[in-house]
Image (tube, rainbow, N blue to C red):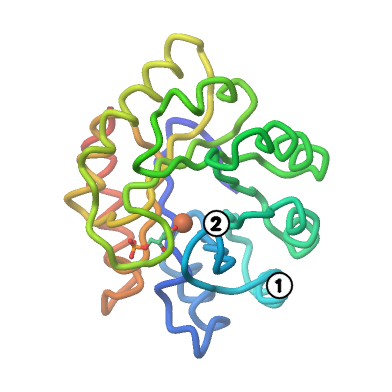
Amino acid sequence: MKSNIAEMMIAPSLLASNQSCFGQEVERAERSGADWLHLDIMDGHFVPNLSFGPQVVKAIRPLTNLFFDAHLMCSQPELLLEPFAKAGADEIIVHVELGEQVQCLIHKIKSLGKKVGLAINPPTAIAAVQPFIEQIDLLLVMTVNPGFGGQEFISECLPKIQQAQAWRREKALSYRISVDGGINDQTAAECAHVGADTFVAGTSLFGAPSLKTVVQKMRQIVNENQH
Ligand SMILES: O=C(CO)[C@@H](O)[C@H](O)COP(=O)(O)O
Ligand SMILES: [Fe+2]
């Protein structure tokens, strides 16, 4: 597992893979040279869509050593933390929009021995995450409204990345800054330029004829544009 903060991480999102053969797609992601596998978990309530659950994560866990980055878009993540931890997630991301539950969720994820991620939706002000930045391993800046792959990048989210980077530097913190939604070579470059170091991409990676080629290209582009 790679976790050096200076290193840029490429995280294909399994949501955009060929879901009729998840196992083969996971192995393809591993062979592509990607660093992480991003797992979008949707409950049909927090977001108007459903994806997959802990059984799928458990089934694919033995197929790869990729770091499993589980993004819970769920109204009651407290019910799912243990199942996803047991299924093999390495990091569990919950949404700051859950309000007063957030502190408790962070403690629970830590107590399960997993890395903690905190996600923020486009309409939510970046100030909402500030009380938690000393406790998290990763901040996931959503650059689309969550629920679906294949949406267009919302460039108004870029100042949030800038602010997260400024806090990280000022306080000498080491949380990763991840971006998720509409990430392609162009938007990844824009995000890298202002401080992002982790790039979740579904459509632009799994949708390409050669996953390996596009992962390598995105890695080169974000390295060239590193903040
Ligand atoms: O969390 C989400 C969507 O809710 C994402 O992780 C998407 O899966 C990214 O897909 P693309 O925008 O890259 O197609
Ligand atoms: Fe996601």
Residue found 52% across the figure and 63% down from its top: 40
Residue found 38% across the figure and 51% down from its top: 180
The percent position of residue 82, horizontal first and vertical second, equals: 80, 55
The percent position of residue 193, horizontal first and vertical second, equals: 23, 32
With 105 as the anchor, is 123 left or right in this view? left
For residue 46, what is the image quadrant?
Answer: bottom right
The percent position of residue 206, horizontal first and vertical second, equals: 35, 72
Q: Which of marks 2 and 1 is in front?
A: 2
Mark 2 beta carbon near ligand 1 (under 8 Å): yes
With respect to residue 196, does 163 lie above or below?
Answer: above
Please tell me which residue lies in front, 198 or 118. Answer: 118
With respect to residue 80, does 51 lie above or below?
Answer: below
Q: What residue type is labelled 1?
A: Pro
Q: Mark 1 points at which residue?
A: 62
Residue found 31% across the figure and 25% down from its top: 162
Residue found 42% across the figure and 77% down from its top: 17
For residue 58, what is the image quadrant?
Answer: bottom right
**Direction left: furthest residue:** 186
**Direction bottom: furthest residue:** 20
Q: Name the residue under label 2.
A: 73
Circle 1: element type: helix
Mark 1 Cα-neighbour bin, 10 Å: few <14, some 14–19, many ≥20: few
Circle 2: element type: strand
Q: Which amino acid does label 2 sit on?
A: Met
Q: Name the disc covering residue 115, or none.
A: none
Mark 2 Cα-neighbour bin, 10 Å: few <14, some 14–19, many ≥20: many
With 189 as the anchor, is 10 left or right in this view? right
